[in-house]
Image (cartoon, rainbow, N blue to C red):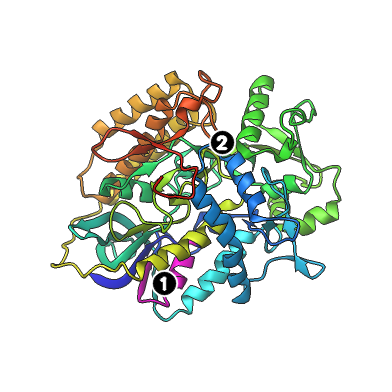
């Protein structure tokens, strides 16, 4: 049992940034399920959205975010994001972070849903890796940060004073370890790897969502799952992200007949918000009986393509594809729009438990995340969470916490088989296009699997499998309730938006789902 001032779960940008900032305030335990470089942030290609140009303004950024969110963005946190984002980015630059430049100034790219060039990138198409490596270096050299690789959080500890820490499974030592602290920050990422076709690393299965729900946290907007329109299609089913910035530089989407189908679909054509592009691609695939469409770059300068997107170019070449011609692409699950509900400081409804990053539902993303808002959200709300803890530190637990989990390695094959079944089920029945029939089938199957789940309650693989089923249910249930189409939630039986559903759907353990009005004023309590 180890005690720290801060327990931080997750080594994506949110967790790393929070750990770095918190290290100036106390001793930090940073726990990560795999290694410190296994995260969505590390593999992010596009960039970070922040206003840095004189031709742009936070108001323009706010307008684009609200438009992409389809009426479900809470205005107060969006205002915080667009106004504080540039400050957080400048702080990183002042500390040595190097974004790409052009003629001596910051290079700014364009991505879907943005009307201004405001996307900062690093290493061409390796922004996530560069910024994550930058912060990993900061964390590894911070004397008060203890990094615990291969430690999976398996339970949030709560007493009468709120969250006191977490139980974690140490895969190397093969034992449960208990971490307690003054405050705990969950930053364990989203759940898109619960789908068969995904751009996420395999560890991104929504562990944090399940942990938070079991602890009693409010969960919001889980029906909204963002599928990235342009992931490389490969016959073996593996998906490799092709950054939105490729379309921002001028790449065009073509169907199997060579037709450019986004013209006339939206005023921004290929740069329409992701939900619109994804649905258009899916329709083309169904109409022509194909498994993919094409992203054409044949009209672009091949030298510039290779310089701007070196990693994508190289990956395509490994697969026998020429990026300077055209690439087969199809949508893949990419980002969990909903998550653990929190306030403007990242506080959950459980005292001393904070969330930030993709796991958090700050109210910014609405029904559909605006491209490249995720990395800047990590910075803005990571800092806010740490600052809020300064006057909000709990006392140590009154008594030691005893371990209770074990592991049965023989359960691994069955756990993997069930995970694959869940992934296929979610892709088919709760994926890009949904219906009452499909969602009900998925829910019935998930409930059936949960009823016959083998293994002891406190055995690691049994808990991991139960968490997968729980996360699937958290997505399916609000998708059934929302009988409309909006953003990352499309119902074939209710294909139009319906203003009666202009509200967040909140789920909480032991309670019926409820609706929460969208905040359209500056008052966060309104």
Residue identified by numbered label 1? 22
State which tag comes first along the sequence, 2 or 1: 1
Measuring from the top left, give residue 41's x and y in whole percent.
54, 57
Measuring from the top left, give residue 12's x and y in whole percent.
49, 60
* The C terminus: image quadrant: top left
Residue identified by numbered label 2? 70
On the picture, is 278 further left or further right than 351?
right
Give the tally of numbered discs: 2
Measuring from the top left, give residue 373's x and y in whole percent.
58, 52
**Residue ranking furthest to the left:** 399
- Please tell me whether residue 482 belongs to the stretch shown in magenta: no
Res. 12 visible in picture = no
- Please tell me whether residue 29 belongs to the stretch shown in magenta: yes
Question: For the residue carrying disc 2, how many other residues have a C-alpha within 10 Å: few (<14), some (14-19), or many (20+)?
Answer: some
Q: Is 56 drawn above or below residue 181 in the view shown?
A: above
Q: Secondary structure at mark 1?
A: helix
Between label 2 and label 1, give the one nearer the viewer. Answer: 2
Res. 348 visible in picture = yes
Q: Secondary structure at mark 2?
A: loop
Task: Specify the quadrant of the image occupied by residue 282.
Answer: top right
Q: Is 313 drawn above or below residue 225 in the view shown?
A: below
Viewer-proximal residue among 128 and 478:
478
- Which mark identifies residue 308? none
Identity of the residue drawn at 39% across and 39% down: 419
Identity of the residue drawn at 47% across and 21% down: 435
Identity of the residue drawn at 17% across and 63% down: 401
Q: CA distance from mark 2 to mark 1?
A: 35 Å
Residue range of the region highlighted in magenta in the rendering = 14-30
């Amino acid at each position: 049992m180890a005690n720290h001032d801060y327990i931080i779960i997750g080594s994506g940008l949110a967790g790393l940034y929070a750990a770095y900032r918190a290290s100036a305030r106390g001793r930090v335990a940073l726990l990560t399920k795999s290694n410190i470089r296994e995260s969505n942030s590390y593999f992010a290609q596009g960039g970070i959205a922040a206003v840095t140009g004189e031709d742009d303004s936070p108001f323009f950024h706010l307008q684009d975010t609200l438009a992409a969110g389809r009426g479900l963005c809470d205005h107060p946190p969006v205002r915080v994001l667009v106004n504080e984002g540039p400050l957080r980015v400048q702080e990183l630059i002042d500390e040595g972070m190097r974004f790409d430049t052009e003629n001596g100034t910051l290079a700014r790219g364009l991505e879907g849903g943005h009307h201004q060039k405001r996307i900062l990138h690093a290493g061409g198409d390796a922004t996530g890796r560069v910024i994550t490596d930058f912060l990993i270096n900061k964390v590894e050299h911070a004397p008060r940060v203890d990094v615990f690789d291969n430690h999976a959080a398996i339970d949030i500890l709560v007493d009468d004073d709120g969250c006191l820490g977490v139980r974690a499974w140490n895969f190397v030592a093969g034992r449960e370890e208990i971490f307690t602290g003054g405050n705990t920050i969950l930053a364990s990422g989203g759940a898109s790897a619960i789908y068969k076709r995904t751009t996420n690393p395999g560890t991104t299965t929504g562990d944090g969502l399940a942990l938070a729900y079991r602890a009693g946290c409010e969960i919001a907007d889980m029906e909204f799952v963002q599928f990235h329109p342009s992931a490389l299609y490969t016959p073996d089913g593996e998906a490799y992200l092709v950054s939105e910035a490729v379309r921002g530089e001028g790449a065009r989407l073509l169907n199997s007949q060579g037709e450019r189908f986004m013209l006339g679909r939206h005023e921004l054509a290929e740069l329409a918000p992701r939900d619109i592009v994804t649905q258009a691609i899916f329709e083309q695939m169904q109409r022509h009986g194909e498994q993919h469409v094409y992203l054409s770059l044949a009209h672009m300068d091949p030298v510039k393509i290779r310089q701007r997107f070196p990693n994508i170019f190289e990956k395509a070449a490994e697969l026998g594809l020429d990026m300077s011609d055209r690439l087969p692409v199809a949508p893949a699950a990419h980002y969990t729009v909903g998550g653990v509900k929190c306030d403007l400081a990242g506080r959950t409804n459980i005292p001393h438990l904070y969330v930030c990053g993709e796991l958090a539902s700050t109210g910014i993303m609405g029904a559909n995340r605006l491209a490249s808002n995720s990395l800047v959200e990590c910075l803005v709300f990571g800092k806010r969470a740490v600052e809020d803890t300064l006057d909000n530190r709990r006392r140590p637990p009154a008594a030691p916490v005893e371990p209770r989990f074990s592991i049965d390695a023989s359960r691994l094959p069955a756990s993997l088989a069930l995970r694959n079944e869940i992934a296929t089920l979610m892709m088919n029945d709760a994926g890009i296009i949904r219906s009452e029939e499909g969602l009900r089938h998925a829910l019935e199957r998930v409930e059936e699997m949960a009823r016959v789940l083998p293994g002891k309650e406190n055995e690691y693989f049994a808990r991991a499998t139960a968490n997968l089923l729980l996360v699937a249910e958290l997505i399916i249930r609000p998708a059934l309730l929302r009988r409309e189409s909006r953003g990352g939630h499309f119902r074939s039986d209710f294909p139009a938006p319906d203003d009666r559903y202009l509200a967040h759907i909140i789920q909480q353990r032991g309670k019926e789902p409820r609706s929460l009005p969208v905040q359209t004023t500056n008052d966060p309590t309104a």
